[in-house]
Image (cartoon, grey):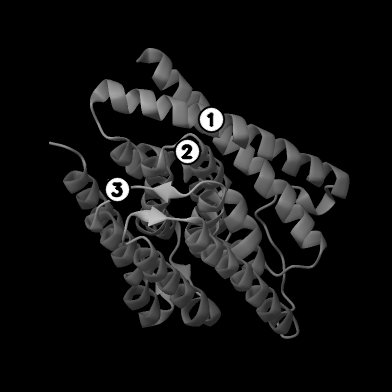
Amino acid sequence: MLLSLLYIFTALVLLYFGATWLVKGSTALAIKAGVSPLLTGLTVVAFGTSSPELFVSLNSAISGHGNIAIGNVVGSNIFNILVILGISSWFLPLKIKLQVLKFDIPILILATIGFMFLFADRLIGRLEGGILVVGIVLYTLINILLAHREKKTDTNSSTEIKPSNAKTQSYWSLALVVFGIGVLVAGSELLVKGAVFIAHAWGVSETIIGLTIISAGTSLPVLASSIVATIKKEYDIAIGNVIGSNIFNILGIIGFSSLIKPLSAIAISNFDLYAMLGATLLLLPFLRASYTLKRDEGIFMIGIYLVYLYYLWPK
């Protein structure tokens, strides 16, 4: 048991630093290429901070733990919205751009509903995985086109989320990306191994472990980057990071994982899926009112997550 806990702790440390290095390097490259803060948050930072989920789900798929692979994504999406946006709004009310409200959040809702439809039989095969991958490619391309259009009118483009990225040379940024990926691979293997051991020792299902401990652990880079971005008033990155991560989790992570090996997860319940959809839909009334996520709304979201954990965890 002690060894399993050590595995999980070490894995979370590796995943955190691996994702941090990956985000730092990729963000530096994106800024050097003149990418806007919103696009950086929705794609580069979002995909980078979702890399722990990607590697954990890939590893779980390969090793035949489909419940962990799917549970990791479902749990992470719930945690990202209810907890990460909730905590971020404690520091400063989060202002949202109209593009995110009119385009990115509806895409996330459609992706969530589409996944629930494809997953109705509790199996995501290679064909369904291919459909999801096509979706993430199209989403990224459309965002790039929108960013180019916005660039003509938005001249204020400074991204504070990188301490010295503006001066970091390209070769060092690439080294950070490569090294970060390597650390993520090692961390994901340790996390899956430790989580399976813990599930067996505690008599708790792998699904619950995936929905809670693993999903929260792999979301640490998203939490850290969103809080830092909020404090520095980079709201585009703070919100875009969460929305983009959730879209990538569904379309990219489940898509790529199922292409490698079809994902069967019969233990994922409708309650979990509707909890993910409900958390996503909750964004619309909160953000549409004043294009701001307020502190009291953030506290309410965290309260909902605690209620979800209460009903999820075995009594």
Q: CA distance from mark 1 to mark 2?
A: 9 Å
Query: Which of disc 2 and disc 1 is earlier in sequence?
Result: 2
Nearer mark to the viewer, of 3 and 1? 3
Task: Give the mark toward the camera: 1 or 2.
Answer: 2
Q: CA distance from mark 3 to mark 2?
A: 15 Å
Q: Amino acid at mark 3?
A: Ile
Tell me where residue 45 sits by quadrant. Answer: bottom right
Give x and y (percent) for residue 16: 56, 37
Q: Say whether residue 236 is visible.
A: no
Residue 2 at x, y percent in the picture: 38, 14
**Which secondary structure lies at badge 2?**
helix
Residue 239 versus residue 55 in the image, above or below:
below
Residue 224: x and y in percent read 52, 46
Name the disc covering residue 60, or none: 2
Judging by the rendered image, the residue that carries numbered circle 1 is 189
Q: Is residue 298 left or right of residue 24?
A: left
Residue under label 3, please give it.
266
- In the displayed orientation, state which residue is furthest to the top: 2
- Label 2 crowding class (10 Å Cα cut-off): few <14, some 14-19, many 20+? many
Closer to the camera in the image, 291 or 133: 133
Of helix, strand and loop, which one carries label 3? loop
Relative vertical location of residue 144 with respect to residue 303 in this rendering, above or below: below
Q: Residues within 10 Å of mark 3 (few under 14, many from 20)?
A: some
Task: Please report whichever mark, 3 or 2, sits nearer to the chain's N-terminal start.
Answer: 2
The answer to which quarter of the image holds residue 166 is: bottom right
Q: Nearer the viewer, residue 105 or 264?
A: 264
Distance from label 3 to label 1 (Cα)? 23 Å
Q: Looking at this rendering, what residue extends furthest in the left direction?
A: 315
- Under circle 1, the secondary element is helix
Give the residue drawn at x 63%, y 42%: 20
